[in-house]
Image (cartoon, rainbow, N blue to C red):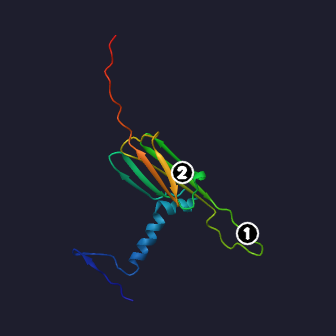
Amino acid sequence: MNMILRQRNGYPLRPTLFGNLFDTMLEEFLSPTAEAAREGGAFSPRIDVVENERGYQVEADLPGVTKEHLKVSVDGSRVTIEAEVRREAERKEGETVMHIERVVRKYARSFELPHEVDDAQAVARLEHGVLVLTLPKKQAAQSRLLQIQ
């Protein structure tokens, strides 16, 4: 079987036969999520962060998580999301469980925002496996003139 070599801008590229498959496997193997899964640690949920003049809207994918097993904390401009999914293996009479991978999964993600968050006004909602955070920016403290005594 011949491998096809392609060129881009005059520079040779690697052979295309299995190139994409190998890249995908390597990317999956080296990704932080795959590493956490291999080490039994926490998975890092994927997030979207959108900023407007009033604050931030954060969406995080947390499939299977219930609000009882979810913890979100805000400390200044740092946001931390921690969650755990536990599934009890249901065994019916006459059934033999052959393989289980979906028993426990932990999620953890911490990130910094450019501005401090007004944690008193922050709102968190969990809808259909998606955590939606509304995080208003903290207003800068107004300076005041001190009376000299």
Q: CA distance from mark 2 to mark 1?
A: 29 Å
User: Taking 132 as reference, is 94 above or below it?
Assistant: below
* In-front residue for pair 45/19: 45
Expressed as whole percent of the image width and height from the top left, the position of residue 142 reads 33, 29
- Give me the residue at 47% from left, 59% from top: 32
Q: Is residue 73 left or right of residue 88?
A: left
Q: Quadrant of the N terminus?
A: bottom left
| Residue at which label 2 appears | 82
Expressed as whole percent of the image width and height from the top left, the position of residue 137 reads 38, 42
Residue type indicated by callout 2: Glu
Q: Quadrant of residue 17?
A: bottom left
* In-front residue for pair 16/122: 122
User: Taking 7 as reference, is 149 above or below it?
Assistant: above
Q: Quadrant of the C terminus?
A: top left
Q: Is residue 11 left or right of residue 80?
A: left
Expressed as whole percent of the image width and height from the top left, the position of residue 31 reads 46, 62
| Residue at which label 1 appears | 91
Residue 49 image label? none
Mark 1: secondary structure: loop
- Give me the residue at 33% from left, 15% from top: 147
Residue type indicated by callout 1: Arg
- Give me the residue at 57% from left, 61% from top: 64
Q: Are marks 2 and 1 in contact (CB under 8 Å)?
A: no
User: Taking 27 as reference, is 106 above or below it?
Assistant: above
Dot 2 alpha-carbon crowd within 10 angstroms: few under 14, some 14 to 19, many 20 or more: some
